[in-house]
Image: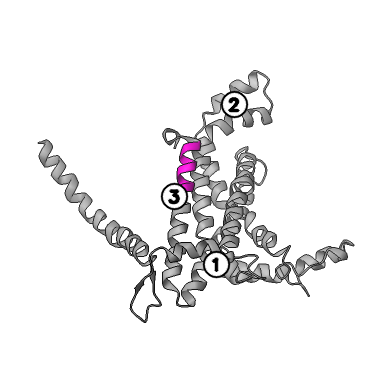
Amino acid sequence: MKNHHRLGVALFLIPAMAVFAVYFIYPVGFLVYTSVMKWDSITPMEFVRLDNYRRLLEDGVFHKSLLNTLAWGAAAVFLHIPMAIVVAMILSRKIAGWKFFRTVFFIPNLISTLALAMLWQFIYNGEFGLLNELLRSVGLGAWQRNWLGEMHTAFPALIGQWIFYIGFFMVIFMSFISTIDPALYESAQIDGATGLKQEWHITLPLLKPAVSIAVLLALTDTLKNFEAPFLLTNGGPVNQTMVLSLHIYNKMNAYQYGYANTLAVMLIAIGAVMVLLVRLLFREKDV
């Protein structure tokens, strides 16, 4: 009987494993294989050993894109997710108009990145941008900048246009908060705990599984981040807003497929390390 059960399980798993092998294992294997090749997709591949990986050590654009990608990930963990938690806690208290605010915060997640990029180009425009007009109207005209065109403001402005899109994680946290037993809050209130103490001592500890999921999703999303840097700055000025995914695209666009795949291998390795660190931080049993 057990053998029949195992055979049935295997038969059900075969299609899924076949799809996984074709669309993940084979592409990753091909990526690793071509990462030690000099390849322009036109001429035959040339084995160059570890030259592509040594090239990473001398590639200043790679160093900058790596730092920017890690900085974006840090902003996701220490700014983006905490903002989503705070908003979720407030709206879960069923304040007046909470459904309206929930919808408002989630709407940006329904709009295409292209449309949002066009909107932020208008906001950040150095000549007639909404942000500069706002600064001028409140007497802070000296603060006006070409926000996406100056080296010291381009990357903060790029992160700034994304950091407030907290709707997705807000919904995740609200769903977890809704599963918390109201009796816990009632008992804490009887003991004299204020709303803030209730959130700190009850809600936050019980949100740990949701936070671990959100951190994983946020970090993997930052590693894949391509559309906003490409549409708003294309990595400029002078590579100040370059991220790994955009650097890979540029190398592919220059027909340097071997080196682009080397960069992609590094991206996968960084992602694997991030996932491992998050698992260790939150403990696998809590996820």
Residue 273: x %, y % from top left: 46, 47
Who's the residue at 63% across and 28% down the image?
A: 198
- The residue mark sitting in front, 2 or 1, is 1
Q: Amino acid at mark 3?
A: Ala
On the image, numbered disc 1 is attached to which residue? 227
Q: Amino acid at mark 2?
A: Tyr
Q: Nearer the viewer, residue 75 or 131?
A: 75
Judge the density around disc 3: few (<14), some (14-19), many (≥20) Cα neighbours within 10 Å.
few
Q: Which residues are magenta?
A: 273-281
Q: Amino acid at mark 1?
A: Glu
Residue 85 visible at all:
yes
Q: Earlier in the sequence, mark 2 or mark 1?
A: 2
Identify the element where label 3 is drawn: helix
Q: Quadrant of the N terminus?
A: top left
On the image, numbered disc 3 is attached to which residue? 272
Which quarter of the figure has residue 24?
bottom left
Q: Nearer the viewer, residue 185 or 38?
A: 38
Identify the element where label 1 is drawn: helix
On the image, numbered disc 2 is attached to which residue? 185
Identify the element where label 2 is drawn: helix
Measure the alpha-carbon separation of dots 2 and 1: 43 Å
